[in-house]
Amino acid sequence: MQYSSAALTVLERRISAGLARLASAGLTRRCPAITERDGVRYRVDGRAVIGLCSNDYLGLADELRPPPAAAGAGGSRLICGDLAGHRDVERMLAALIGSEDAVLFPSGYQLNLGVLPAAITRDDVVCSDALNHASLIDGLRLARAELRILPHLVAPDTIAIPEGDAALWWVTESAFSMDGDIVDIVALRRHLDRGGLAYVDEAHALGLYAGGRGLLGERDVVPSILVGMLGKSFGVAGAFVAASGPVCAWIRSRARSFVFSTGPSPLLVAAIATAIERVRSADGDRRRERLWHAVAHLATRLGVDHAPSPIFPIVIGDNQTTLEIAAAMLERSWHVQPIRPPTVPPGTARLRVTVTAGHDVAMLDAFVDDLQQLLHDARLPLVVSRGLGDPGAIAP
Ligand SMILES: Cc1ncc(COP(=O)(O)O)c(C=O)c1O
């Protein structure tokens, strides 16, 4: 294939300058090549490791064996791609959450990008937590309503509900992906009770509580729109909105990433159906028990009083140092991918350590011993710090 040379020169010049900038800031990204994965044990670039950075909290990703299915939906669900499997899975998801209806998407990123602008109107006022995930930030950019960035974990109590048909939204994660802390449930109830709307992303909480529910189900809070991801504790991929019948009907008509995209592959849909059954089963209960036991053990080893999620951020700060510590851990056969800006605020690069049902106490002890030794040698403290680097009231 021959590229046009003049354009190529410009593009290559720009990109090589950009790559050099990334490298000097310690921000180069590369996909680690994973092979021979069996739960938390796999190889990274050929080296046998135990991983502590996946979102496969219940350890299901390697264990689900869905029945064979067709590969493609054949078109948008609204044209000719709406198959029985899609509708069945949406019913199963609505039953899991206890909502009237649910709408399936191929990924959580695609969902947030489409659903936020469909649900929010230009006259609304939207409050978004400062540490919300990139997909929420990008969806809100597309929604183009008045935006207030709330300091992390602060509720929009002081913000007035607009007049008329306009709404006050609170957009938040329930368990924060990079910090592992959780939304103030009492404040969320208060917000709903005074007539506010809530859009809650349960990516890192769904599946972790009794019956496979998320944090909101566990605490009996019904947000206006709940979104759940299926690539984390469900071990597959995809995402869904759970809401009232009319809200879901509106999303099927107006969320552009639903309307203008091929329906999720029936292969994916079959895997999701298998995952929902497993997550809800007695096997799911056993996995949750093992998971929370591992969470409590790691919390004790790391000197944390209470761990509200399986996510433990060990904030190092500087990008380069974080890369070096992660590389040294890899040499000792532990895979903890360094997390750097823009995934987290500048100056808060970290090892985001996650526990799953596949980790036993001996593994966690050996991991903490090695991490303690390395950080001690580098004269760095080993502390779990949640909610650091809150960028505060900065519009995205
Ligand atoms: C809070 C949150 N929302 C949305 C997403 C995107 O979900 P998906 O991976 O299905 O695209 C993620 C994934 O990292 C997430 O952590």
Image: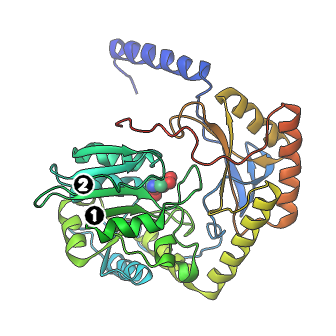
Q: Hey, which quadrant is residue 27 in on the image?
A: top right
Image spot of residue 54 (x, y percent): 64, 56
Callout 1 amino acid: Gly
Classify mark 2 as within 8 Å of ligand 1 or not, answering yes or no. no
**Label 1, label 2: how far apart the Cα atoms are:** 9 Å
Image spot of residue 154 (x, y percent): 44, 52
Callout 2 amino acid: Ala
Image spot of residue 379 (x, y percent): 84, 31
Q: Mark 2 highlights which residue?
A: 160
Q: Earlier in the sequence, mark 1 or mark 2?
A: 2
Mark 1, Cα crowd under 10 Å, few <14 / some 14-19 / many 20+, is many
Q: Is residue 233 left or right of residue 240?
A: right
Q: Is residue 385 left or right of residue 183?
A: right
Q: SS of the residue at dot 2? A: loop
Against 353, is 184 above or below?
below
Quadrant containing the N terminus is top left
Asked whether residue 329 appears in the rendered view, the answer is: yes
Q: SS of the residue at dot 1? A: loop
Q: Hey, which quadrant is residue 316 in on the image?
A: top right
The residue located at (89%, 50%) in the rendering is 369
Residue sitting farthest toward the front: 158
Quadrant containing the C terminus is top left
Would you say the residues marked 1 and 2 are in contact, meaning their CB atoms lie under 8 Å apart?
Answer: no
Return the residue nearer the eye: 308 or 77: 308
The residue located at (58%, 41%) in the rendering is 388
Image spot of residue 89 (x, y percent): 39, 78
The residue located at (75%, 72%) in the rendering is 293
Q: Mark 1 highlights which residue?
A: 196
Against 54, is 357 above or below?
below
